[in-house]
Amino acid sequence: MFINTGHLEEQPELTVCLVRFEDENGELGLPVTVWPDELMIGSTIQP
């Protein structure tokens, strides 16, 4: 679940995203901060 976006106070040109990920039971985990390029929306990774 995508929660919010923001930036680093000392480097306002860097965007960060606050997200929550679902586990295999559909329960949301704690919010974590990730870089936008670490996110894939609408895609699945298969081994």
Image (spheres, helix red, strand yellow):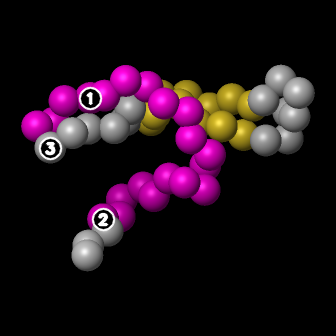
Q: Residues within 10 Å of mark 3 (few under 14, many from 20)?
A: few
Residue 47 in the image: x percent, y percent? Answer: 25, 76
Question: Nearest the camera: 4 or 30?
Answer: 30
* Residue found at x 79% / y 41%: 14
Q: Which badge, 2 or 1, is on the more N-terminal residue?
A: 1
Q: Residues within 10 Å of mark 2 (few under 14, many from 20)?
A: few
Is 27 displayed left or right of 12 in the figure?
Answer: left
Q: Which badge, 3 or 2, is on the more N-terminal residue?
A: 3
Q: Which residue position is annotated with label 1?
A: 28
Quarter of the image where the N terminus is located? top left
How far apart marks 3 and 2 lie (CA) works out to 14 Å
Residue 22 in the image: x percent, y percent? Answer: 26, 38
Q: Which element carries disc 2, helix, strand or loop?
A: loop
Query: Is residue 30 in the magenta section?
Result: yes
Query: Is residue 41 in the magenta section?
Result: yes
How far apart marks 3 and 1 lie (CA) works out to 10 Å
Q: Which element carries disc 1, helix, strand or loop?
A: loop
Q: Amino acid at mark 2?
A: Thr
Quarter assignment of residue 45: bottom left
The residue sitting at the front extreme is 47
Q: Which residue position is annotated with label 3?
A: 24
Q: Which residue position is annotated with label 2?
A: 44
Is 13 displayed left or right of 40 in the figure?
Answer: right
Q: Which element carries disc 3, helix, strand or loop?
A: loop
Residue 5 in the image: x percent, y percent? Answer: 62, 32
* Residue found at x 16% / y 36%: 26
- Please state the extent of the stretch shown in magenta in the rendering: 25-44
* Residue found at x 87% / y 34%: 11
